[in-house]
Image (cartoon, rainbow, N blue to C red):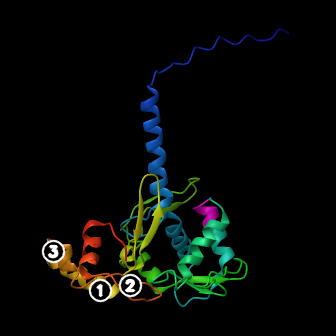
Amino acid sequence: MGKRQLPPEEPAEIHEVMLRDALEERYLAYALSTIMHRALPDARDGLKPVHRRILYGMRLLRLDPGTPFKKSAKIVGDVMGSFHPHGDQSIYDALVRLAQDFSSRYPLVDGQGNFGNIDGDNPAAYRYTEARMTEVARLLLEGIDEDGVEFRANYDGQSKEPIVLPGGFPNLLANGAQGIAVGMATSIPPHNAAELCDAALHLIDKPEAKSKTLLKWVKGPDFPTGGIIVDSKESIAEAYMTGRGSF
């Protein structure tokens, strides 16, 4: 029996694109992906995707404050399998940082076991440590079932994850954030939550209030390890108003 001859393939349609335009378009797509999905926090809840996925994964495991701790290995495995397929070590490193009271002004994870120390000693492996959410993390997630935030499909389309958390706590300014992306970076210091709430209440009453007025309540950053800021009030004010400066 002779072989069946396939019809000749039609030549693929060829589009001519300027190299400059192609590079600009692809680099922009790469940059946006890096900015939105890895490197920089969302201004609404102050969390990077890995942190948001850890907290949402812990909520699905019912690790609320006051409940029994669960092994960090269980949390890391569930987050990696359902939401963040980027390696177990990066997820555990992020979870550890959320539990360190010398790294976070208001820790989002309540850790049990060796989570490292301020001298730089490494935490124990995730099979030895346990974790649950703190009250601050609970506030960030409060109301997530009330259609207050949008959800999107996870990486394999098998379940859904929140795009952003409801954020009943001023996490971006309270805990600060650091990140380096493509062509941009952020370094926001932590602040005192009570001062932030006082400033927010004033801003609600007077939406046109300027930065200098808000400095009446938020006088400067509030680092988890304490310390004395030696900068003048004028240089602190300039850093807040311009977004550039150091403490």
Residue 188 appearing in the image? yes
- In the image, residue 155 lies at what x, y percent? 56, 54
Quadrant where the image shows the C terminus: bottom left
Q: Which residues are magenta?
A: 79-85
Amino acid type of the residue that numbered disc 2 sits on in the rendered structure? Asp
Amino acid type of the residue that numbered disc 1 sits on in the rendered structure? Glu
Badge 1: residue crowd in 10 Å (few <14, some 14–19, many ≥20): some
> Can you identify the residue that label 1 sits on?
195
- Which of the 4 quarters of the picture holds residue 74? bottom right
Residue 61 appearing in the image? no
Q: Is residue 59 left or right of residue 200?
A: right
Amino acid type of the residue that numbered disc 3 sits on in the rendered structure? Ala
Mark before the other along the chain sequence, 3 or 1: 1
- In the image, residue 25 lies at what x, y percent? 43, 37
Observer-nearest residue: 162 or 184? 184
Mark before the other along the chain sequence, 2 or 1: 1
> Can you identify the residue that label 2 sits on?
222
Q: Relative to 148, does residue 142 appear above or below in the rendering?
A: below
Q: Relative to 229, does residue 176 appear above or below in the rendering?
A: above
> Can you identify the residue that label 3 sits on?
209
Residue 34 in the magenta stretch? The answer is no
